[in-house]
Image: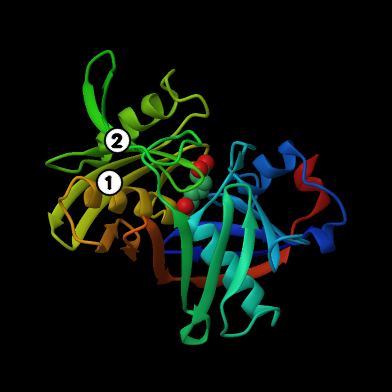
């Protein structure tokens, strides 16, 4: 099975081209490919390009647990770079269909920087359009967290804190991801506001666990900081893996820019799946 691997600030993805594979991936294959011991290892799989009736390309995104995500910011930026590497796009803007809506993407700086218009950020996990930002309290066995829902197609729960702590992310991220109120589970971000144009986040991704960076998490956390009046529309998001730049317009449409790096390509032996 042919693959190409990239990372966006340490958030690593494997691209599998459906044309090369000639069929769907099974859940077991997804889990093995993403496994860091039994497979290649990644925070997810980008299955594309597929033909789209509405956009230039279609992308499907899989988490390492075998589930399908509606959207991935870094996944989209990496996929845009993959298309650019394959000369399927140039330096002009193009569109990509995802389960979580259509986005526009543009590759710059000889492939090293990719900008994606992520679509509208909403302060809900549902389909209702105009929902005001709303505080929710989550009571766990030994801790209580107050946070805010946001969605850019995939669900996020953003928790403002005074201090970030990686141990806290590992300890409570999975509990909040699986908290009963979240019908489709949730991605989790702990958010520290640094100043009006800078935030820092720790991320626990649905179906993937602790990650060094996340594009949709950056967008959701920036939108919550903005919605609470703590930040201006142009926000630099610091994560353990690096920085993503987010801009939110007056209609809550978010644009995300950051670095992408190609790691390499190869093929996975059939016996890895036995
Ligand atoms: N790394 C991603 C998010 C990937 C999808 C996420 N795990 C989910 O299930 O929604 C990003 O950069 O946005």
Q: Which callout, 2 or 1, points at the residue further toward the start of the chain? A: 2
Identify the residue position indicated by label 2 in the image.
Answer: 148
Res. 243 visible in picture: no
Q: Nearer the viewer, residue 100 or 131?
A: 131
Q: In this image, 168 relative to 52: left or right? A: left
Res. 186 visible in picture: yes
Q: Which mark is residue 2?
A: none
Give the percent coordinates (x, y) of residue 214: 42, 53
- Residue 146 versus residue 201 in the image, above or below: above
Q: Nearer the viewer, residue 173 or 170?
A: 173
Can you tell which quarter of the image residue 248 is in? Answer: bottom left
Identify the residue position indicated by label 1 in the image.
Answer: 224
Q: In this image, 188 relative to 90: left or right? A: left
Q: Are marks 2 and 1 in contact (CB under 8 Å)?
A: yes
Assign a secondary structure to mark 2.
strand
**Residue at x 29%, y 17% (from the top left corner):** 140
Q: What colour scheme does the image use?
A: rainbow
- Residue 233 versus residue 38 in the image, above or below: below
Whether disc 2's CB lies below 8 Å from ligand 1 is answered no
Can you tell which quarter of the image residue 90 is in? Answer: bottom right
**Residue at x 63%, y 71% (from the top left corner):** 82
Q: Nearer the viewer, residue 104 or 187?
A: 104
């Amino acid at each position: 099975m042919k693959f190409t691997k990239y990372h966006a600030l340490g958030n690593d993805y494997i691209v599998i081209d459906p044309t090369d594979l000639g069929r769907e991936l099974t859940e077991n294959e997804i889990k093995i490919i993403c496994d860091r011991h039994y497979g290649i290892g990644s925070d997810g799989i980008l299955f594309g390009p597929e033909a789209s009736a509405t956009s230039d390309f279609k992308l499907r995104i899989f988490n390492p647990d075998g589930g399908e995500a509606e959207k991935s910011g870094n996944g989209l930026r990496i996929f845009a770079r993959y298309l650019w590497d394959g000369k399927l796009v140039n330096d002009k803007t193009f569109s990509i269909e995802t389960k979580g809506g259509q986005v526009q993407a543009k590759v710059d700086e000889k492939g090293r920087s990719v900008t994606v218009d992520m679509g509208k950020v909403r302060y809900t996990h549902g389909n209702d359009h105009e929902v005001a930002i709303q505080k929710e309290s989550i009571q766990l066995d030994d801790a209580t967290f107050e946070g805010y829902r946001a969605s850019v197609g995939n669900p996020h729960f953003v928790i403002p804190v005074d201090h970030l702590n990686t141990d806290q992310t590992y300890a409570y991220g999975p509990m909040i991801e699986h908290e009963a109120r979240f019908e489709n589970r949730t991605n989790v971000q702990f958010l520290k506001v640094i100043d009006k144009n800078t935030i820092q986040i720790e991320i626990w991704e649905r179906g993937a666990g602790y990650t060094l960076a996340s594009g949709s998490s950056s967008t959701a956390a920036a939108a919550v900081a903005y919605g609470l009046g703590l930040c201006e529309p142009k926000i630099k998001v610091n994560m353990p893996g690096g920085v993503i730049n987010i801009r939110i317009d007056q209609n809550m449409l978010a644009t995300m820019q950051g670095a992408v790096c190609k790691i390499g390509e190869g093929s996975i032996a059939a016996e890895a799946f036995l």
